[in-house]
Image: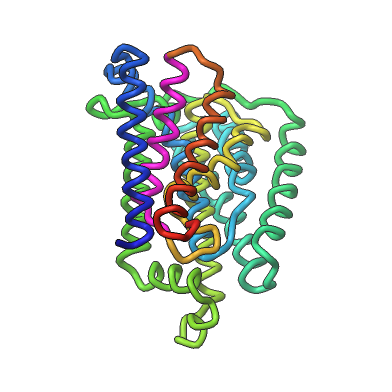
Amino acid sequence: MKVRNYQIIVLNSILVFLIVIMTILTKGRILRLESLQAVAFQMPLLGLLTLAQMVPMLTGGIDLSIVSNANLAGIIVALILTKLSGWYTVPLAILAGIGTALLVGALNGFLVAFVMISPIIATLGTMILIKGISLGITKGYIIAGFPKEFLFIGDGAILGIPMPFIIFLVSIFMVSLLLNKTIYGISVYMLGSNPIATEFSGVNIKSVLFRTYLLSGFLTGIASLVMIARFNAAQAAYGESYLLLTVLACVLGGVNPAGGFGKVSGLFVAIIVLQVVATGFNLLRLSSHLANALWGLILIFVITINRTITGKWI
């Protein structure tokens, strides 16, 4: 059996185990409709940011600027929503937010693909640059008070399904389609597995890398819309704790940090595992810090099991 299949089996087994344990400990409250809806509202933000992190990781890179990028895009959206009024305000704000995130993605792609700076250094630089710009614009203050039409993105529902969850599912479907059914997706996996062989096979590596960070920027832009609509506010330092969580979720879901391996389906299961732990601990009124500790323990457990069974870490 393939290494990845072992990891997915272990991860799914952990998910079932956690659901059973949390159901017993919370006396079934975790399976109530209101709890499931809470999960569906909370999970998409981390899920979208993790998707944005996954794509560069498949090429063997990383994007440390995703949270700062999301905050800057959110601030631009917030400024337009609070300064302008008219039928065009919400669509203009959404386009400006996604456009801002795409510009940052393009900058990352240019630095990594054409200037050939290491991804961790290039995105560290843009992370600091963007945060400085965000603080300069807001002076550290929060921008709040958005129209209800925009807030629907973060707290609305269609047929009882939370809007953020619908956006997350659509994003998962589109990214999965892109990675598994297009030449670009095949090139991403090839590049992560063996860059030299990929180059000799005629693939334009620079173009693939540039489009990868552009895609990461686009997904970050979508995440920023969900984030500020959920909080009804934008700020330069929102969601900073999500950065390392996105890396944890990617590795837990089977994405190889060295690139070349990883599926969107594995990432989806990993996000559910993390959210089940967080929701269960919240219902049990346990510290969120303990939930963080359990997330780390689960990651170590999964990697150790894979090592024991297959002789490989990832």
Q: Nearer the viewer, residue 288 or 175?
A: 288
What segment is highlighted magenta in the picture? 262-283
Which quadrant of the figure contains the N terminus?
bottom left
What sort of colour scheme is used for the picture?
A: rainbow
Look at the image and tell me whether residue 48 can be seen. Answer: yes
Please provide percent x and percent y for residue 10: 36, 45
Corner quadrant of residue 17: top left
Place of residue 264 in the rendered image (x, y in percent of width and height, measured from the top left)? 37, 52
Q: Does 205 sit above or below residue 213?
A: below
Residue 185: % across, % down: 39, 67
Q: Residue at x 57, y 37 (%)?
A: 242
**Residue found at x 29% / y 15%:** 28
Q: Residue at x 62, y 36 (%)?
A: 75
At horizontal 63% and vertical 49% (from top left) the residue drawn is 65
Q: Is residue 173 left or right of residue 145?
A: left
Name the chief secondary structure element in magenta.
Answer: helix
| Front in this rendered view, residue 128 or 271 | 271
Looking at the image, residue 119 sits to the left or right of residue 12; the answer is right
Residue 67 in percent (x, y) is at 60, 42
Q: Is residue 273 left or right of residue 173?
A: right
Query: In the depicted view, which residue is nearer to us: 247 or 170?
Result: 247
Does the magenta-highlighted stretch encompass residue 270?
Answer: yes
